[in-house]
Image (spheres, rainbow, N blue to C red):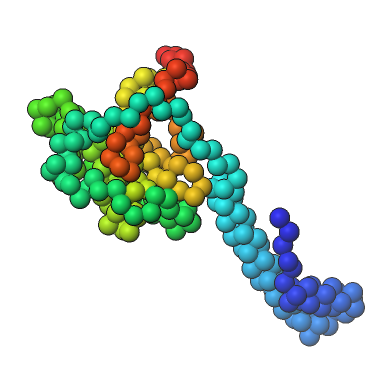
Amino acid sequence: MAFKINPQWTKVHSMCNDLSLTGSTNKAYSDMLRTCYRKLMLYTSCLLLSCVTSLCYSQVSNENNSKVIPLNFSVVKVTPRPLPYQDFCRRYPAECLLNGNRTIKLTPKALTLLQRINTQVNNEVSFMLDIDQYNQEEFWALPLTGSGDCEDKALEKRHRLAKLGFPRAAMRLMIASHKKFLNSHALLTIETDSGIYVMNSFTDKVKAWYQTPYNYEARERVDGQWDRYDQSFWTYEPHTD
């Protein structure tokens, strides 16, 4: 990346250089030269700050746009919502109405909000199994008690993001399986113009779907049905102690 040098910096640099070449030793000259170098250092600092800011913005833009890989798995079956999710939707119908735009523009502001909500929910909601909290093997709920498991955290993230203005149609649940530990896990996926991003209860960092350690089993559709993916292409990582 090329940066345009501030004309004022060039002018001050040239002035300082001319003063230093005169070789004068009187006090007025010395004071003038020190003042010149102080100005030069100030302009240099501003120039460096501008460069760093531009590089940071460029890095964010490149990370979001340079490698867009679609989630293009073969769908082997379309099924209704999982039964515990159906029960949740009967209790909270507005939470399951996936309306609005199906994608969001992944601006730096949007990414910051996604990151903030992901971190907040992960830190504020303590993990608790449904059997311990509700005396049921599977009970999907908003974590109003301050505790919940992975699908409860995913639902809470969507709830908070919707209140911030994110369209529900762009925020869909996903069921995945860890490539190493093989445990089933629920995630919230965000459909963006830079690909699908994942909000995970096990990490605060919002990542592209292909940067996570999961095989993907099923994903929610806008119409409320679920796409179930071909599992013959799943890959696994060795589990070493």
Left or right side of 152 for 173? right
Instruction: Please state the horizontal and vertical placement of residue 90, each as a whole percent of the image.
Output: 14, 41
* Image point (64%, 68%), residue name: 46
Q: Depth check: give the residue in front, 75 or 180.
A: 75
Q: Residue furthest right?
A: 22
Q: Looking at the rendering, which quadrant does residue 40 occupy? A: bottom right
Is 213 located above or below residue 26 in the figure? above
Image spot of residue 217 (x, y percent): 37, 26
Residue at x 70% of width, y 75% of height: 39
Q: Quadrant of residue 140 in the image?
A: top left
In terms of image quadrants, where is residue 206? top left
Q: Is residue 101 visible?
A: yes
Identify whether 181 is placed above or below 78: above
Of 86 and 149, which appears nearest the observer? 86
The residue at the point 43 percent across, 53 percent down is: 104
Q: Quadrant of the C terminus?
A: top left
Q: Nearer the viewer, residue 219 or 39?
A: 219
Of 236 and 21, which appears nearest the observer?
236
Position of 10 compared to 73: left or right?
Answer: right
Compared across the picture, whether 198 is left or right of 152 comes to right
- Please tell me whether residue 21 is drawn above or below residue 181 in the rendered image: below
Q: Residue at x 16, y 46 (%)?
A: 92
Horizontal side of residue 13 vs 223, given as left or right: right
Q: Residue furthest bottom?
A: 28
Residue 175 visible in the displayed image:
no
Task: Tell me the quarter of the image containing the N terminus.
Answer: bottom right
